Image (cartoon, grey):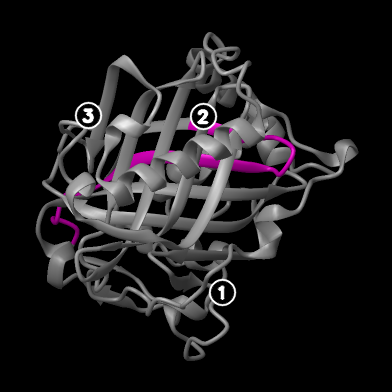
């Protein structure tokens, strides 16, 4: 049975969906294979440092970490090889494809996300997020080397229990609201086996974390500690890519940390004084993929990097 939390939130999800529905048939002439092929072409062109190999629209928009760049700058000059890890999320209805992965940039192996929008078989938007330091703030998990996505992301959801587009968006949005507005996980439709990775490292329900640590807790148990008070706002939320068949949502947003929160909850019920990067203002830009099964969030994988506090999204 689908989660009543998601059903209750579906109206909110529908309002978030409305701007995307107007463009629902934009990529109708580009099916799943076509969109995947566009991403293949994109990486081939990046490696060749030649954007002229792509079927670009005349008004192409290109960004890296929220900053508009020329389509010959940034990654176009530094990528050296195809992604060593690549996880695609495809939305035929919207004509968009997103990717999370690891790419060779110069002498570095960097986590990244790419979103491509296709209209009339031409690329109109390319949005990149690149983590140009994989160490991350204090407390980030160690990246786990992988070459393939978790199998659960490729599993097709049964038609009889499959969530609608608006329900999928509502579940993902409930996660963001639970982070920036609530102190427990009561209103977030977490599956008991929910697991979260950020920049390749396990951050919730980790199979290798020390017992009693924050990373060892499940997704809901983490939220129930109240640790999320350090996230003061999640803004510029977008849900441009939804794959109903696989129960996937690719979301984008900015996590603001005001730096003024003095402490947060720990798994043992005590409080931890805030220190390090979280004691000063900064923001994360994030690309996050949610696997939703039977209306509940089962798996989360994210790529995120720091940007100036309050930075506009660029979109």
The numbered dot on residue 314 is 3
Q: Marks 2/3: CA distance?
A: 18 Å
**Badge 3: how crowded within 10 Å, few (<14), some, or many (20+)?**
few
Q: Nearer the viewer, residue 250 or 172?
A: 250
Q: Is 109 left, or right, of 5 in this rendering?
A: left
Disc 3 versus disc 1: distance between alpha carbons? 33 Å
Q: Which residues are magenta?
A: 240-261
Above or below: residue 214 compared with residue 301: below
Q: Residue furthest top?
A: 22
Where is the C terminus found, in terms of image quarters? top left
Residue at the far bottom in the pictured view: 210
Query: What label sits on residue 229 in the rendered view?
Result: none
Q: Label 2: which residue?
A: 96
196 left or right of 309 in image: right
Which SS class for mark 3? loop
Residue drawn at x 11%, y 46% as measured from the top left? 308
Label 1 element class: loop
Q: Can residue 315 be seen in this snapshot? A: no
- Count neighbours of disc 1 (C-alpha within 10 A) and say few if under 14, some if 14 to 19, many if 20 or more: many
x then y, percent, for residue 104: 30, 64
Residue 69's place in the image compared with 118, above or below, is below
Q: Name the main secondary structure of what is drawn in magenta.
A: strand
Element class at badge 2: strand
Mark 2 or 3 closer to N-term? 2
Q: Position of residue 98 (x, y in %)?
A: 48, 41
The residue to which callout 1 is attached is 205
């Amino acid at each position: 049975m689908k989660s009543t939390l998601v059903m209750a939130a579906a109206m909110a999800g529908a309002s978030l969906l409305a701007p995307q529905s107007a463009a629902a048939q934009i990529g109708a002439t580009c099916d799943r294979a076509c969109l995947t092929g566009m991403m293949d072409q994109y990486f081939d062109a990046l490696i060749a440092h030649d954007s002229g190999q792509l079927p670009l629209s005349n008004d192409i928009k290109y960004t890296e970490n929220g900053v508009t760049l020329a389509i010959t700058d940034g990654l176009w000059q530094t990528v050296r090889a195809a992604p060593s890890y690549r996880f695609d999320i495809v939305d035929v209805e919207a004509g968009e494809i997103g990717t999370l992965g690891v790419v060779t940039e110069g002498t570095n192996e960097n986590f990244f996300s790419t979103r491509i929008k296709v209209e009339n078989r031409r690329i109109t938007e390319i949005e990149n997020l690149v983590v140009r330091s994989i160490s991350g703030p204090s407390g980030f998990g160690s990246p786990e080397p992988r070459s393939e996505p978790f199998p659960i992301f490729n599993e097709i959801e049964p038609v009889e229990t499959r969530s609608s587009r608006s329900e999928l968006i509502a579940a993902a949005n409930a996660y963001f609201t639970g982070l920036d507005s609530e102190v427990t996980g009561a209103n977030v439709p977490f599956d008991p086996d929910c697991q979260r990775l950020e920049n390749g490292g396990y951050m919730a329900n980790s199979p290798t974390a020390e017992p009693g640590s924050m990373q060892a807790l499940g997704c809901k148990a983490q939220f129930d500690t109240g640790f999320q008070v350090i996230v003061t706002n999640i803004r510029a939320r977008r849900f441009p890519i939804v794959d109903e068949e696989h129960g996937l949502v690719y979301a984008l947003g900015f996590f603001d940390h005001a730096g003024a929160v003095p402490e947060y909850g720990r798994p043992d019920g005590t409080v931890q004084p805030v220190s390090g990067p979280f004691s000063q203002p900064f923001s994360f830009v994030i690309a996050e993929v949610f696997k939703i099964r039977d209306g509940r969030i089962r798996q989360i994988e994210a790529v995120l990097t720091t940007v100036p506090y309050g930075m506009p999204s660029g979109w």
